[in-house]
Amino acid sequence: MPSSTQDPSSTQDPSSTQDPSSTQDPSSTQDPSSTQDPSTKHKDPVADPRYSPRRWAALVVTLAAVLMDMIDATVLNVALPSLRDDLGASSAQVEWAIAGYTLAFAAAMITGGRLGDMYGRRRVYLAGLGSFVVTSALAASATGPQMLIAARVLQGVAAALMVPQVLAMLQVEFPKSEHGKAMSMYGMCFALGGLGGPLLGGVLLDADLLGLGWRPIFLVNIPIGVAAFIAAVVLTRESRSEQALSADVRGTAIATAGLLALLYPLVEGRPLGWPLWILAVTAACPLLLWLFVRHERILARRGGSPLVDPALFRHRGVIGGLSVAVLFFCGTAYTLVLTVHLQTAAGYSPLRTALSMIPFTIGVGIGSGFAPRLMPLGRTVVILGALVMAAGMALIVFSVDRYGTGIAPWQLIPGLVVAGLGMAMVAGTLLTIVLAKVPEAEAGAASALINTSIQVGVAAGVALIGTVYFGRLDGGHDGVESAVIGMGVVIGLYLLAAVLALVLPPGAVRGTPAPASRVPQGSDA
């Protein structure tokens, strides 16, 4: 679904230029995103040497990266039962296989965008795409859960290299008059990926190609990725920013350590029996986050390029946006509970499970049509969206509890549609509401930070909700009861997100939603 958040690559300097080393006409180094519309000098963009005549074909090729990322972020849920049986994975290892990908993406994507600005977006895109193909092959050939988790983490890093370049290349390669159409194609990838990932996984698992079970869900990336790589070499041009920010490697490392100190105890604490060293790791989390803030402030005072500009936290909208983003998108882990429950307790096939989730996507599509019209309500639309999402979850919990293991797909439709409406109301407006009160010069950094928080929320949700749900199952509790309790925690998260949305600045907001970026869609744990 088209979402509200900008890609971290949006932080690049607006003077982004085509690399002089490109084989294109030297005049292509002039900034196509200049404040002077190119149409004032060239009525026909095709005749303007700054824009490649093959830019639309190049866009389609680069969007393959976004589509593969979305599919890989959503496809694993329907494969969890068969994957768990085949590899002998524990519930904690299953959670890491999902959360590891998202956490790695979140930790590395701002740095990935900066690397593209510094060394060339085409070069970094190709490096990320090639790495994604290799790591997909590693995931498909995993002989145990540890190997799969490692491959998934590396996949997330590869995605963080390639995905941020797509929006940056789009902004550089297209005249302003074509940005709307190009952005629509970009946003469409999220709807296709969110819907296509589970469906593709269901089809491949039901087909059981060559008796490979779950492995084709990763193998399918190899031919697509190789074809996209070759086409990108032929069709895309190099570009970089004249004033690119440097990569804050130390800040990235400290922030990643802090996030791991939060997530690791959530996933591993229960199976290990909460030993003292796990509690010590938990206590280290706030210390590491404090060290991160201190490092960023020192770096900013010295004139460096901090990963997160400390000045952003002066704005109430940013603080509120971060809080809402983390809590709200924690709740998307409900799909982990629902897809596993439908297969293990209700006896659904992977394909039937994926088809049962389609009403959520329908709800998102309907909500995306009217959510922008609610923008004048300001933070109220976010509050209402979180409450609507909670109501949708409540309807799903009611159906799961009432119909038990005999639940039919149609009995989930009302709750999934309502939940989709709530997702669209928040994901389609949150960033625009946050940026409304943030100075324009800091808008790119703020959008990157919010988008990172969304991914952190997704990973934390898998850790928290997965621990509650699998903890009940592994403790011998009834599957229906376990699912109800797991999704009950989700309802609590959405209600808390509605309360925290009051921190967002009040007042009406005018304008159109921000460009699309990678936002979970319910089928994405």
Image (cartoon, rainbow, N blue to C red):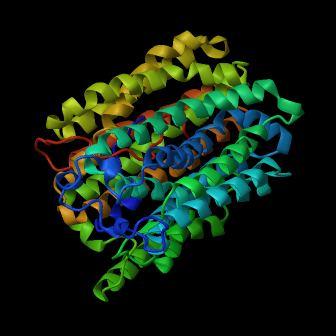
Q: Residue furthest left?
A: 507
Q: Is residue 196 left or right of residue 237?
A: right
Residue drawn at the location 40% of the way across and 58% of the way down: 168
Q: Is residue 58 visible?
A: yes
Q: How many marks?
A: 0
Q: Position of residue 359 (x, y in %)?
A: 49, 19
Residue drawn at the location 59% of the way across and 61% of the way down: 126
- Above or below residue 29? Residue 153 is above
For the N terminus, the image quarter is top left
Residue drawn at the location 79% of the way across and 57% of the way down: 147
Residue 377 falls in which quadrant of the image? top left
Q: Position of residue 253 (x, y in %)?
A: 53, 74
- Above or below residue 357? Residue 187 is below
Of the pair 69 and 435, the residue shown nearer to us? 69
Of the pair 271 and 524, the residue shown nearer to us? 524
Residue 204 falls in which quadrant of the image? top right
